[in-house]
Every structure is written in structure tokens, then in C-alpha cells.
Amino acid sequence: MSPTASDLLISEWTLISLSTIVIAARVYLRLVLQKRKLLSSDIWMVVAWLMGIVVACFCITYVHLGLMEQDITLSLANYKASTHDKTAVRQLLWISSLPFILSFYLCKAALLCVYHQVIPVFMKKRRLFLWITVGFVVLSCITTLLLLFTICTPVSRFWALDPEQRCSMASVLVFFRTSWALNFTSDILSKFNTCEQDKAELTSLVFILPWLIVPDLMIKGYLKIGVYLTFLLGLINMAVSLVRFYMIYTGEHIARNSVVMIHFWNSLDLYIGLVIACLPALRPYFNLAAESRAFNYVTGKTDRSSRYTGTNNTSSTSGTRSSHVAKPPPAYKPASASRPSSPPPHLSRSSSYEMDTELLRKS
């Protein structure tokens, strides 16, 4: 059963609402609680969100024009309108491709900015792979935009109604399949990037070999479940993208599929990626919640143990232990105390997310 216009709008605005809540929480944290400027990843995330809203507004326009019916294909054969209106609709379909393409790559830019912030400088191989990924994503975006303008020249052939002047379906398929392949490959590189800050810490949005890495990390069960769910969301996005290719771009599907079917799978792929791009913004809140639960757990365990042992017994035990420890004479000063200790090189640049968590805790 093919989706309807209601299914399209409900799925679009549900995912947009989720991303809006996440972005609002992030902006509130940075601007109101911390009174600090937005990070580059926050800016890319907001721009991707705005571009996604532009795409959704185009879909609302198509519904208002009566284009989102299950029997109307890209040829507009069953679309009951004047020649002028059909030309205007085909122009809108071509123009809406620009924010649609940019939305995909802006989501990737937001994720790559997060990786640039959290991957330490001393991890040279991972940062090199990160910059290779950035270069590939930029080239993919430029190539897709160039194809949109050059696959059929002049571009007016996209909205021509005369079959002899109109851009051929073979050229349209070349553009769709090439743009999908570049987008899917850059998705794998940007979402399956790896970063590990410490042996006991995993960054929030990392999508490489999660089922092998996470079991070895020293994190609590509820945190591990959250990481697995995040990984699962990335895999779902990959699966939706593959289904989109099969349902739309294989065989003769592009010719017989309705416009609402094409927009449904395109928007589902786009807005799931938008939600994934926004999830790293919640990392300071997750860290604070995890630390609070861990602190309450440790405090409760200490209180329960003190009921059985007693504070006097604890203090006497600690005093007995300290009496057996050799103490240096009063005049003795270790050589290392004369000069200030410098932190390790990899701690000189603290991650902005750890700073966010610290400031959020203080506020």
C-alpha cells in the first residue's frame, strides 16, 4: 500500500518536531545557562534544521496544489491542471531539489564538526581519516549540485512539457542514482567514523563497530543501552536509504511511482538523518544524568555500609593503616614538588562537551 499525503506530512513533522526539541535544548544550554556562543556544530545543525523545514514547506505546497495523489507520477499525466500550472509545478520540483540536497550534506557537516571537536589532536590517524571524510563529503556535495545543473542543458528542459524537449528519463535516473550513491557513501564515512577519548568513555555519536567496542567499555548498563539505541538509529537510517533506492531508483520504478511515494521515502531518509545529526547536542545532559545516577548509587552504597560498620570502626581502621605507612621527615621535600606539574599533552585541550557538562552541573 503506497503512502498518502497525510502519511507524508505526519512523518515529516514528527521527525522535525523531535529535532526541534533537541536543538532548543542545545541552544538553551549554550545561550541561556552557560551564556556562551554556539559552537560550529550547533550552527551547522541549526542551518540543516532550517533547510529541512524549507523542504517540508515545499511538500505542503504540493499537497495544496493537489499534486500528492497516488495516481500522479513525475510525468504529471494524470494531473488535472493547465499547461501553465504544470510548468510551474515542474519548476517547483526542480527548485526543491536544491534544499533537499543541501539538507543531507548539512546534516553530515554537523556530525563532522562534532567529530572534529571530540577527537583529540594526538590521534593523528583518526584525524587524518576525519579530514579525508570531510574532503569526500564536500566533493560529493559539489558533484551532486553540478549534476543537477549540467545533466540536462539548458536546465529549462527539466520543466519542459514537450516530450521531445524534455529531459530524458535516462538522464534523470543517472542523476538520481549518482546523487544517492554519493550520499550513501558519505553517510557511511561520516556516521561510521570512530573516536575514543578514553578507555572508559565513548563519544555519543560514533557509528563504527559498536557491537564489538561497547561491551569492552567500562560504562553502566543504562548508558550502554543508550549507546546501542543510538547505533541502531544510524543503522535504521542506512536501511531506509537502501529501501529508498530499491523502491524509487531501480528498474522502471521511477516512471510508475507516484510523486507522494517518491517524496515519502526521500523525506524519511532526510529527517531521520536530521534527528541523528541533532542527537550529539544532548550529550552534556546525558553526561550530567549519568553522573548524577552514579553519584547517588555510590552515596547510597556508602550509607548502607556505614550502618553496618560504624564510623568509629572506619576511623580506627584508617588510623591503623596510616600508622604503618612510612612518613618522610618534615624537612624532606620531593624533587617533583618544587616545579608545577604539567598535565599530559592530550589533556591540554579539553573537549567542549566536557566543558558543557561541567557548566551545566554548576548551573
Image (cartoon, rainbow, N blue to C red):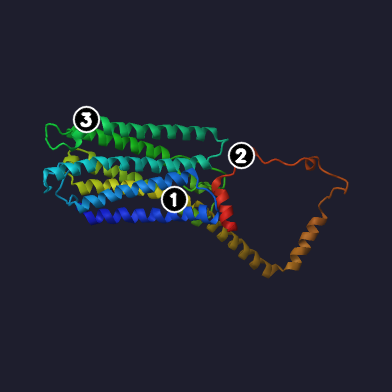
Q: Quadrant of residue 167?
A: top left
**In front of the other: 181 or 76:** 76
Which element is circle 1 on?
helix
Check disc 3 and report the residue beneath it.
Answer: 154
What amino acid is at disc 1?
Answer: Leu
Q: Are marks 3 and 1 in contact (CB under 8 Å)?
A: no
Which element is circle 3 on?
loop
Give the image location of residue 255, x and y in percent: 16, 40
Give the image location of residue 128, x and y in percent: 50, 32
Picture residue at 39% right of the left edge, 42% below the top: 106
Q: Is residue 155 above or below residue 292?
A: above
Mark 3 → mark 1, Cα distance in angstroms: 41 Å
Picture residue at 65% right of the left edge, 64% below the top: 302
What amino acid is at disc 2?
Answer: His
Which element is circle 2 on?
helix
Mark 2 → mark 3, Cα distance in angstroms: 54 Å
Q: Is residue 282 above or below residue 176?
A: below
- Using a 10 Å C-alpha cutoff, classify the residue at mark 2 as few (fewer than 14 neighbours), some (14 to 19) or many (20 or more): few
Query: Of callouts 3 and 1, which one flags the residue occurring earlier in the amino acid sequence?
Result: 3
Q: Is residue 95 in view from this perspective? A: yes
Left or right side of 163 for 58: right
- What is the number of callouts on the image? 3
Left or right side of 39 for 240: left
Query: Of callouts 2 and 3, which one flags the residue occurring earlier in the amino acid sequence?
Result: 3
Check disc 1 and report the residue beneath it.
Answer: 279
